[in-house]
Image (cartoon, rainbow, N blue to C red):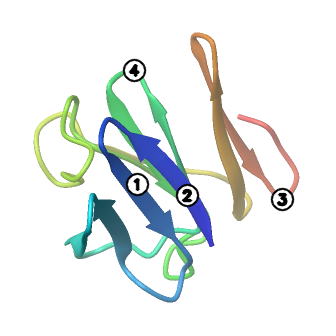
Amino acid sequence: MTFLSSNDSLYCFNTADLIGKLNGTTYTNPIVTKKPAFGAFFDNSMFVGGDPAAPNTFYKSATNNPEDFAGAGSDTFTASYPVTSLTSAGRALYGFTKNTIN
């Protein structure tokens, strides 16, 4: 299981369950279509990847709405190889796949 924090929320990823969100003492599954292994925040959006249903796909949430992967500003990116990790550093987002860094 991997974790990603934002403001007062902790997002949980594990590929077996929908993305979980812990906000204080309440645990919910606000994103009902994705089961990614990991995520990263970058440029006011949440990026996720490693979903077994679409192993080569990175998903971008709508700007300023990390729980909306279908609205305006959301997007998907398909890599040539299965996604293995995501991280942001400074003004860059790095997407790792089995054989590349994007």
Residue 12 visible in rendering: yes
Q: Residues within 10 Å of mark 2 (few under 14, many from 20)?
A: some
Residue 38 visible in rendering: no
Question: Mark 4 belongs to which amino acid?
Answer: Asp
Q: Secondary structure at mark 4?
A: loop
Question: Mark 3 belongs to which amino acid?
Answer: Lys
* Left or right, 41 with reference to 7: right
Q: Secondary structure at mark 2?
A: strand
Q: Which of the two discs, 3 and 2, labels the residue nearer the N terminus?
A: 2
CA–CA distance in space, label 3 to label 2: 21 Å
Front tag of 3 and 2? 2
| Residue 55, picture quadrant | bottom right
CA–CA distance in space, label 4 to label 2: 18 Å
Q: Which of the two discs, 4 and 3, labels the residue nearer the N terminus?
A: 4
Marks 1 and 2 close (CB-CB < 8 Å)? yes
Q: Residues within 10 Å of mark 1 (few under 14, many from 20)?
A: some
Q: Measured along the vertical axis of the image, is residue 81 above or below residue 62?
A: below
What residue is disc 1 on? 10
Front tag of 4 and 2? 2
What residue is disc 4 on? 43
Q: Measured along the vertical axis of the image, is residue 1 above or below residue 72?
A: below
Q: Which of the two discs, 1 and 2, labels the residue nearer the N terminus?
A: 2
Question: Percent x, y for residue 39?
Answer: 52, 51
Question: Mark 2 belongs to which amino acid?
Answer: Phe
Q: Which of the two discs, 4 and 2, labels the residue nearer the N terminus?
A: 2
Q: Measured along the vertical axis of the image, is residue 37 above or below residue 79?
A: below
Q: Which of the two discs, 4 and 1, labels the residue nearer the N terminus?
A: 1
Question: Percent x, y for residue 52?
Answer: 57, 81
User: What numbered label is drawn on residue 47?
Assistant: none
Front tag of 1 and 3? 1
Front tag of 4 and 1? 1
